[in-house]
Amino acid sequence: MADSGSDSDSNSIPEEQQEICDAVRAFDVEALRRCLAAGVDPNLREPRSKFPLLYYAILWGSGVRPERTIQARLACISMLLEAGASVDLGPEGTDGRTPLHYIASYKTPSYQAVIALLIKSGADVNTTYFGGSVLETAAMSGVAATVKKLITAGAVGLDRALVKAIAKGNQRTYAPLMRAGAAIPLSSSTFCEKIRIAGGFKAYENAHRQRLVAIFAPKFPHLPADMLGRVLEFVFDVGGH
């Protein structure tokens, strides 16, 4: 979301609305607190764009070093939600696209905290936008961490999400989907064919883990094989290659 508008535009906007919009875009937590305490609606839409305040808190400046603003961004998001902002309220005319749906494709690591906060706050993990689910968006974008969070939160439609991920060639998201039970489509990638030949994802994952253990066991002779296997899961994408 890029900056837009001019000083002349702001003259036609009520002062209290302009103040809270400015506070959110500046990630000014104290100014936002004052505006909300004064009774400004946390579900207010920015008058020109018709985007809700929560959208601005989540997306404003997201394309420029978002890690620099993540803590203040999270504080503003939390404050709006605690004040009653709807976690699923989208912009006007977007046919139901929620904030979670919008950022499910974000690959910036710092945004995982935003996604986790929205899910914790009750965001609908099964909402659709023009027929596409949040899980499909994350799977097609190759964001494995988001796929895992959505599945843990109860996202459904794993089979379809896997098909979409395969179509985009985003192998990074295959493993979490198959680990959760997604069926391998008949027409799929070479990687999926290897899994089918192995007898399913669990068998393929176990074989991959055993190969890694065989490689690293000589370097850690005092570590039991099962413990070494668990350690390697934190280092390698076991079953994901």
Image: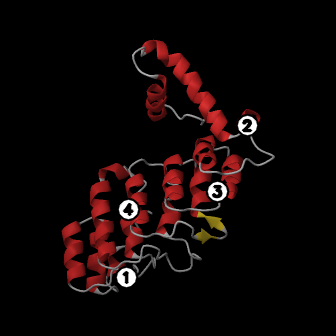
The answer to whether 216 appears left or right of 128 in the picture is: left
Mark sitting on residue 44: 1
The tag earlier along the polypeptide, 3 or 1, is 1
Judge by depth and name the residue closer to the eye, 2 or 220.
220
Is residue 61 visible in the rendered structure shown here?
no
The tag earlier along the polypeptide, 3 or 4, is 4
Q: Residues within 10 Å of mark 2 (few under 14, many from 20)?
A: few
Does residue 190 lie above or below 106 as drawn?
Answer: above
Pointer 3: what residue? 158
Residue type pointed to by label 3? Leu
Pointer 4: what residue? 117
Is residue 110 visible in the rendered structure shown here?
yes
The tag earlier along the polypeptide, 2 or 1, is 1
Which SS class for mark 3? Answer: helix
Does residue 172 lie above or below 140 as drawn?
Answer: above
Which SS class for mark 2? Answer: loop
The quarter of the picture where residue 16 lies is bottom left
Measured as percent of width and height from the top left, residue 46 is found at 39, 78
Measured as percent of width and height from the top left, residue 95 is found at 59, 77
What is the distance, in whole Å, between disc 2 and disc 1 at their CAs? 53 Å
Pointer 2: what residue? 199
Is label 2 or label 3 in front? 2
What is the distance, in whole Å, between disc 4 and disc 1 at their CAs? 20 Å
